[in-house]
Amino acid sequence: MADATGTTSASTRAPHGADAGEASARPKRPRALLVVGLAGLALFVAFAFAVVQNVDAPFTQPFDDAWRVLVGLAPGTGGEAWALPMFFQYLGEIPGAVLTILLIPIWLFVIRRWRSALFLLAAEFGGTLLVSQLVKNLVDRPRPADDLAAGLYGPLFSVDHGSFPSGHAVSAGILLVAVAAILPAAKRRWWWIAGALIAVGMIWQRTLINAHWFSDAVVGVVGGASATLIIWWLFANLLAKDYGRPLFRRSTVAPANEGAS
């Protein structure tokens, strides 16, 4: 009886041990992504509330004014139309949207990294609609305007209403994090540098053409990047399944002696 009981107990315990092993083997989402994303998003929301208290002159207005004096262009100089500023202008408009929500996702589907494609689309649409457009309409901060007596000018390109956050800057923040999430960890180092330069360049371009206040662009990058970190955390286990697949197809050449006996 004792032996039978011992055998039964061992046999009933084994499946539970296997289940525990399987549970422990499941990958865990990196908590740092969630923590940093939530912290950045909290900062973004706090700044939005601060701006709403006085949309015409929030607490950052003195620095925003000083930055516009230093960086903002006057009409007719042509400085806004050379290649580098226009690169950032187009990156946040239709050409950039075609690249990030059409061409790159299509390519990811072609190379069978559909999980990465879905993540990228979720980040782009989620960040653009919630972080950019929703907050822009709720806050409705006025954009820089002409102040000829002070030698200051308004936007040099056609813009819509609402200065906070900069939609171009939000897109740059999304791009910075989303591309890093798609890349395997070993290949992210150089992208972090390139992506950071894109984000800084976008802040510069949006203030160069007087389309946004400096704080609109900086906090816009933070908002876009933070929201994408949270989406990365949600997709982390799915993305991990794509990391083993190459980002570019490689043609395979059969060995010359294949099939030889």
Image (cartoon, grey):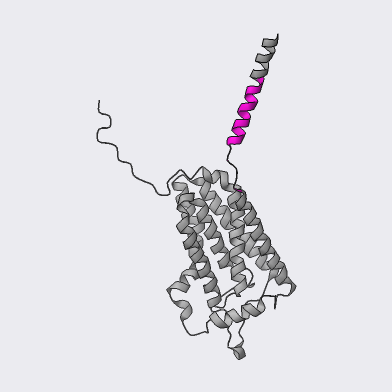
The percent coordinates of residue 221 (x first, y second) are 58, 65
Q: Position of residue 61 (x, y in %)?
A: 66, 78
Seen at 68% across and 18% down, the residue is 9
Evaluate whether residue 154 shows in this view. no
Q: Which quadrant: the N terminus?
A: top right
In this view, the residue farthest toward the top is 1
Q: Is residue 32 above or below residue 25?
A: below
Q: Please identify the residue farthest to the bottom as the structure is shown.
A: 149
Is residue 78 visible in the rendered image? The answer is: yes
- Helix, strand or loop: magenta stretch: helix
Side (left or right) of 138 relative to 180: right
Residue 120 in picture, x, y percent from top left: 54, 53
Please check the rendered image and state whether residue 22 is part of the magenta-colored stretch, yes or no: yes
Q: Write the start and end of the magenta stretch as one range.
A: 12-30
At x 58%, y 53%, the residue is: 122
Along the line of sight, the residue nearer the viewer: 193 or 116 = 193
Rendering quarter of residue 229: bottom right
Residue 17 lies in magenta, yes or no?
yes
Location of residue 42 in the rendering, given as x and y in whole percent from the top left corner: 68, 60
Residue nearest the viewer, comparing 129 with 256:
256
Is residue 138 toward the left or the right of residue 81 in the image?
Answer: right
Q: Residue shown at 56%/76% (left/top)?
A: 207
Front-most of residues 42 and 163: 42
**Considering only vertical position in the picture, is 202 above or below 99?**
below
Residue at horizontal 54%, vertical 64%? 172
Furthest residue in direction front, as rendered: 2
